[in-house]
């Protein structure tokens, strides 16, 4: 009994240590990867970084941008989309400007006057978020998935909200920044990189709102967990056992080291020795008496029992935990040692899996410039028995074409990651064991980040090797990759700056498609070639629009965009040209009184922001031009139909007068040629034939209406002085003379 109790306590201790290790991994992952990344986006990417395209060099562009400038706003929307794409777990980033009532979303686009157009933008603007701000007393807070469920109906989204300016009361702030996180994706990487099971992990804030739960039902209906939350309220850190639905559960919680969150981990208590211990409780009193009597005997034979027990445990391990059925307590002892052995193997697996997680965490800190020297970096790598030996580094970013990448499910993406990682590892890490040449991390948006240790003398040679690597990858996966490579650097404090510059190079994929290696020198060459474009180009385009020479416009536009790619122009050159073309089309639509919503400036800018490459851009502009000319034709047809209708009414109302093509054309200020062509085009009848038809219809009515009037008088009244000619024309139309027609119809 004492032995079982002793083993039971050991197992409990091991379980507690294992649970602490698990929740600590969860804490490290969330604090250093999730929260830190959000902090970086808010404090650096939004408040500190200067966006050169916006020509802003003052404190922070978030305070300076003008929402009424559509070019400026589109820059910001594209920048937010770029920020969101850098983290696979970010669903979207939004900015709301109260003063201008403007809402910018990395996912849904740009919207003006959002409070006045609530019905129109209901599914595009998160009005729940804007309403909840009114009740906040803090400039920085979290919104739980339960609060977000009305807007994100098919996702579990947790939102981080920052109100600015920061040092004023929340109700007086002007700008609202929201980073919306898909919590299913947040921890997908964590569970895939470790052997931690998706048990009950939870995150709560200082108000005990449930922000994350592996059980989605609990997440959306947090009131179901009142018992658990009441226990955790009282202490900062703790470990408890509770009884739930007849089962014993272990609960352990730790606080975040960055903010006021708490991380919670619950597991079922399935310890077999606890069950055995409980079943022996009744026997304890009687057994104690017997133990005292036979204590001497047990001490005497103890040394004889030790060796068989040890052999039994060794045998069970060698047999791979195969079930053995000896009699009595041996079975219990065997099961106890087998259980311990299994748990030790699990712990060993956790340590091995942690190698990847630890290395990823180090690389993330390096990219975020939180590691300042090579010595500090190698000190962190000691736990993995690895180190870098050169003083210089450069960053290689690999981007998989998003059209290709997002076709695959999670498992297929994992296979792609593993394959690429093996290729990279075999290509770079060929040195002796423990020496790192390259370390890489990947996300689920199709980006690989490689930190490569180099000697500056070998940099040019390694660029050539990178070209060979690109050929290998494109051959393996059919040309879907682009590389971005920085210059080598020694100062690790600037790693973040180099990383962001390299990410910015990928916008050139828009022009040059896949299969490229973008370097700082190449980007500089593009920008040096790109002076301000010739204003005559825009004037020619405007002339083609006004004169409706749209086939020529489409041809010239395709030629110009193709030359941008051939001659190596910059992305900014192409982008500014596109914005100017959109402005020209919008301006001409206004001058032509075209009210098509799809040709509005707002719609054109949002549509352009979704274009992926230059070929798609050319096709899109051609579609816009086709829609423009279609609207012109519709408008012209409406005008012409109205004009011909007026002319027909004029002819019918003046049939008794001397009507001719010249007289009618003069009356409507038209040329005779234009009137003749337009009349034939609209009615399908020649002008002269129509006038004759109207006159003889009038003659037929006069013949049957007033029998006293003479045929000659009718002919003269309708402009025919020659009665024989009138009679001939009448007979050709009605098959009889006017006199015969009158007799027949009377």
Image (tube, helix red, strand yellow):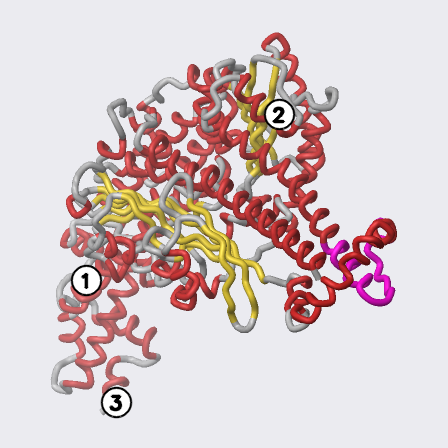
Left or right for 9, reference 116: right
* Above/below status of 377 relative to 672: above
- Residue 63 image point, x, y percent: 22, 34
- N-term mark: 3 or 1: 1
Instruction: Determine the CA span between mark 2 and mark 3.
Output: 116 Å
Q: Residue furthest bottom?
A: 746
Left or right for 204, reference 378: left
Q: Is residue 499 magenta?
A: no
Left or right for 379, reference 168: right
Instruction: Determine the CA span between mark 3 and mark 1.
Output: 32 Å
Instruction: Determine the CA span between mark 1 and mark 2.
Output: 92 Å
- N-term mark: 1 or 2: 2
Q: Which mark is residue 745?
A: 3
Q: Which residue is mark 1?
A: 646
Whether residue 149 is visible to the viewer of this picture, yes or no, is yes
Disc 2 is placed on an element classified as helix
Marks 3 and 1 close (CB-CB < 8 Å): no
Q: Nearer the viewer, residue 345 or 155?
A: 345
Residues drawn in magenta: 313-339
Q: Residue furthest top?
A: 457
Q: Tell which tag, 1 or 2, sits nearer the viewer.
A: 2
Q: Is residue 338 magenta?
A: yes
Task: Give the image quarter of residue 221.
Answer: bottom left
**Magenta stretch: helix, strand or loop mostly:** helix
Left or right for 428, reference 76: right
Q: Which residue is mark 2?
A: 382
- Residue 647 image point, x, y percent: 20, 61
Whether residue 671 is visible to the viewer of this picture, yes or no, is no
- N-term mark: 2 or 3: 2
Q: Nearer the viewer, residue 482 or 652?
A: 482
């Amino acid at each position: 009994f004492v032995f079982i109790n002793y083993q039971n306590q050991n197992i409990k201790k091991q379980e507690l240590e294992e649970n602490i290790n698990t929740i600590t991994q969860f804490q490290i992952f969330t604090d250093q990867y999730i929260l830190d990344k959000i902090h970086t986006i808010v404090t650096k990417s939004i408040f500190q970084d200067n966006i050169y395209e916006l020509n802003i060099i003052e404190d922070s562009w978030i305070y300076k941008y003008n929402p009424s400038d559509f070019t400026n706003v589109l820059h910001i929307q594209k920048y937010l989309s770029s920020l969101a794409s850098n983290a696979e777990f970010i669903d979207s980033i939004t900015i709301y400007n109260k003063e201008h009532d403007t809402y910018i979303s990395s996912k849904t686009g740009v919207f003006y006057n959002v409070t006045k157009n609530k019905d129109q933008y209901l599914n595009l603007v998160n009005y729940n978020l804007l309403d909840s701000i009114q009740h906040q007393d803090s400039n920085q807070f979290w919104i739980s998935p339960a609060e977000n469920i009305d807007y994100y109906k098919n996702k579990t989204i947790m939102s981080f909200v920052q109100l600015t300016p920061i040092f004023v009361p929340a109700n007086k702030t002007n700008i609202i920044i929201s980073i919306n996180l898909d919590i299913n994706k947040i921890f997908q990487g964590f569970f895939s990189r470790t052997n931690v099971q998706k048990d009950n992990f939870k995150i709560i804030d200082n108000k005990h709102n449930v922000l994350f739960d592996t059980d989605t039902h609990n997440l959306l209906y947090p009131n179901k967990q009142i018992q658990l939350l009441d226990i955790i309220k009282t202490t900062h850190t703790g470990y408890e056992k509770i009884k739930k639905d007849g089962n014993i559960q272990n609960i352990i919680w730790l606080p975040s080291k960055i903010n006021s969150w708490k991380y919670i981990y619950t597991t079922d208590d399935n310890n077999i020795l606890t069950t055995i211990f409980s079943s022996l409780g009744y026997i304890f009193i009687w057994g104690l008496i017997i133990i005292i009597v036979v204590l001497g005997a047990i001490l005497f034979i103890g040394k004889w029992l030790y060796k068989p027990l040890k052999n039994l445990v060794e045998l069970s391990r060698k047999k791979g935990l195969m079930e053995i059925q000896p009699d009595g307590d041996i079975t219990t002892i065997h099961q106890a040692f087998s259980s311990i052995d299994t748990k030790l193997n699990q712990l060993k697996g956790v340590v091995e899996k942690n190698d990847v997680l630890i290395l990823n965490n180090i690389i993330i800190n390096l990219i975020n410039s939180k590691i300042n020297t090579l010595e500090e970096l190698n000190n962190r790598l000691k736990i993995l028995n690895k180190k870098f030996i050169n003083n210089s580094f450069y960053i290689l970013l690999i981007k998989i074409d998003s059209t290709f990448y997002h076709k695959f499910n999670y498992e297929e993406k994992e296979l792609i990651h593993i394959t690429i990682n093996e290729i990279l590892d075999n290509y770079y890490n060929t040195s002796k064991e423990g020496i790192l040449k390259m370390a890489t991390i990947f996300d689920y948006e199709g980006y690989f980040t490689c930190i490569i240790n180099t000697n500056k003398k070998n940099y040019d040679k390694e660029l050539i090797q990178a070209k060979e690597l690109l050929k290998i990858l494109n051959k393996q996966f059919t040309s879907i990759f682009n590389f971005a490579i920085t210059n080598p650097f020694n100062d690790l404090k600037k790693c973040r700056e180099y990383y962001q510059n390299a990410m910015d190079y990928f916008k050139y994929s828009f022009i040059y498609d896949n299969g490229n290696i973008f370097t700082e020198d190449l980007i500089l060459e593009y920008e040096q070639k790109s002076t301000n474009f010739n204003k005559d180009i825009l004037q020619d385009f405007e002339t083609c629009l006004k004169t409706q020479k749209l086939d020529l416009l489409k041809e010239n536009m395709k030629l110009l965009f193709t030359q941008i790619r051939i001659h190596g122009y910059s992305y900014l050159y192409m982008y500014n040209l596109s914005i100017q073309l959109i402005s020209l089309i919008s301006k001409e639509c206004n001058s032509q009184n075209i009210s098509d919503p799809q040709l509005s400036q707002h719609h054109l800018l949002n549509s352009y922001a979704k274009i992926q490459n230059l070929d798609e851009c050319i096709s899109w502009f051609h579609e816009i031009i086709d829609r423009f000319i279609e609207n012109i034709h519709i408008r012209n047809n409406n005008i012409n139909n109205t004009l011909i209708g007026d002319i027909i009414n004029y002819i019918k109302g003046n049939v008794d007068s001397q009507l001719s093509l010249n007289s009618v054309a003069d009356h409507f200020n038209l040329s005779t040629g234009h009137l003749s062509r337009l009349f034939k085009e609209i009615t399908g009848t020649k002008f002269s034939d129509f006038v004759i038809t109207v006159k003889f219809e009038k003659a037929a009515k006069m013949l049957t209406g007033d029998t006293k009037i003479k045929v000659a008088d009718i002919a003269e009244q309708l402009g025919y002085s020659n009665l024989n000619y009138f009679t001939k024309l009448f007979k050709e139309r009605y098959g009889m003379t006017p006199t015969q027609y009158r007799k027949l119809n009377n």
